[in-house]
Amino acid sequence: MSWRPTRLTLSFLTLVGWALFLGVLTGRSELIIVAVPLVVALLVGRRAGAAPDLDVDHAVSADRLLEEERVTVTVRLRATRAASLVEVLEPLPARVRVAHGSHRAFFTLRAGEEVRWEFVLRCTGRQRLRLDGPHARLWGPLGLAAAETRYRAPRRVAVYPQVAPLRYPPRPITTQTFVGNHVSRAQGEGIEPGDVRPFAPGDHVRHVNWRATLRLGTLHVTQHHPERNADVVLVLDTLSEVGPPGRTVVDVAARAAGALAAAYLARKDRVGLIEYGGQLRWVRPGSGRAQFQRLLDSLVDASVVFTYVTRDVDLIPARILPPQALVLALSPLLDARFVRAASDLAARGFDLVVIAVSPVAAAQAAARRGGVADLAARLWTLERRAQLAELRQRGLSIVDWDGVEPLDVALAPLRRPRLRRVLA
Amino acid sequence: MLRLAALLLVAVLAVVPTGVLAAAPVTWLAGLVLVVGGVGALAFSIPLITTGASLALITYALALVLGRPAVDPVPAIAFGAALTLVLALVHFAGLVRGARVPPTVVAAQVRLWLTVVALGVAAAVALTASAALLAPMLVGAQLPVVTAATALGAVLVAAGIIRTLVAR
């Protein structure tokens, strides 16, 4: 660190120059006297020695957060020698707000003195937050000289999408072989009663339906439906996005994907994720808390990467997209490539539900409100309604969601048992 | 609080010349000093406050030339001290705006300003006293000698400005 004169030095020199010039011009000694305090200030403000070294320690209270949660940043400062004025600034990345305190502070340090400074940040959008470390600026006496340095001590915080509780996620048409919470259509050991049939050798006595047996005169047993898990694959459309930062359709879809993943994983299902966009990335279906963490990590990084290349769903391996899986596609349906991919999946017999995240509200939030904007939004809503109706006619199962109302409300029509649809 | 103090200092810069001569051109210029300096103090703008201070110096010089009063170092020392303080104060206030500033920092800065101003006042008093002592001995000094000495000071200041600009 080395001292550099500031613009205040220029101001002082300007005034000294004026005073001396006018003193010579007018021949009045008062103007020379006026310059004396200014010259003394300049001499005091001139620092010949080296700037004191600062020890900086920089820490954050958490390395994983959900959107809108807060993280406390703590900075500790210690100077080897006395510093009359130290300015410390922690640069803030985008989509981060100061919730409490200030990310810029001033201190006066004695030799060896340590000061601690805290401020609270609110993370308004999913991201991999990176706090590189504070900038420090030492001000000389009267602010006539300054020395700057930057302390690099990067701290990373993963800000995950907010996961709202979801009570009724869409039920899969087919189930898998492992134990879960979905009532299977197949007959077997379970709690949910099914058909009643005549007793056959090998049947357990505890399955005998005594009421039916007495009425019909022969032994009858109650069959049961086993509780099985399901494979669920979430397909996130990252081909296009609309809306202000932190509230784009991709952000809304990522939050919905997080909520769906949490709901299915709580039901012992296996959940996978495919990010269908400029980059085709996926997370293999799995279950448990570790899988939820993997999905959230993937959702944090989901972003739009521009490309002209269309990647076919053929590229996705079968272990990522199991044939009997329930596929939930989250998309604003703005890009024809995604509509084609969804139609392709449905045509191949996948149990597909498209959750169409409306881009209209996001676009309105980004645009300036006015008569023309409102009219455009209404026309866009009508056009979109027609597009969804056409896709429904072609056999796609589509749920329209404005991204504002709870996802449970939008998914309510899917609570009824669904049948596999054939694409026209 | 800092704004109020800066406004008070700007008022001092406007009042000192009118105290020397309360005539029309001086009062007009003093009004201009109040406006420009006041805006600079309210906005914590260093360029505006420097402009206001320069105008105040010109006003003071004009008042001295038009009024031709006897030499009085006290208002001049007060004027110089006010100039120093107003620049330091406006710079500090603009710097800390929107930041966390503990009261100890403000107290330390105020102590520093007062110390520097006290040093400046002491230097000005010493200069005035030594000038009063030297005056009888330099009665026969030629005007060109005095002018050359002052011009040398002005050249040194200009050199300082150039060095500052180059360093930036």
Image (cartoon, rainbow, N blue to C red):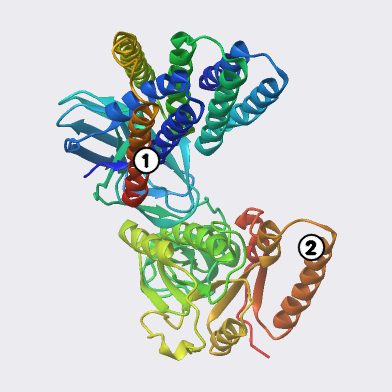
Amino acid tagged 2: Ala
Same subunit, labels 2 and 1: the answer reads: yes
- Give the mark, 2 or 1, whose residue is nearer the N terminus: 1
Distance of mark 2 from mark 1, alpha carbons?
Answer: 48 Å
* Residue B146: percent from left, percent from top: 36, 27
Q: Quadrant of residue A114?
A: top left
Return the residue nearer the eye: A22 or B123: A22
Q: Chain of mark 2?
A: A
Locate residue A234 relative to residue A150 in the image: left or right.
right
* Residue B42: percent from left, percent from top: 59, 28
Determine whether the residue tagged by mark 1 lies in a helix, strand or loop: loop
Tell me what residue is drawn at x 33 percent, y 51 percent.
B166
* Residue A363: percent from left, percent from top: 68, 63
Q: Is residue A370 above or below residue A89?
A: below
Q: Residues within 10 Å of mark 1 (few under 14, many from 20)?
A: some
Q: Chain of mark 1?
A: A
Return the residue nearer the eye: A181 or B34: B34
Residue A6's tag is 1
Locate residue A333 relative to residue A15 in the image: left or right.
right
Q: Which residue is mark 2?
A: A373
Return the residue nearer the eye: A2 or B96: A2
Determine whether the residue tagged by mark 2 lies in a helix, strand or loop: helix
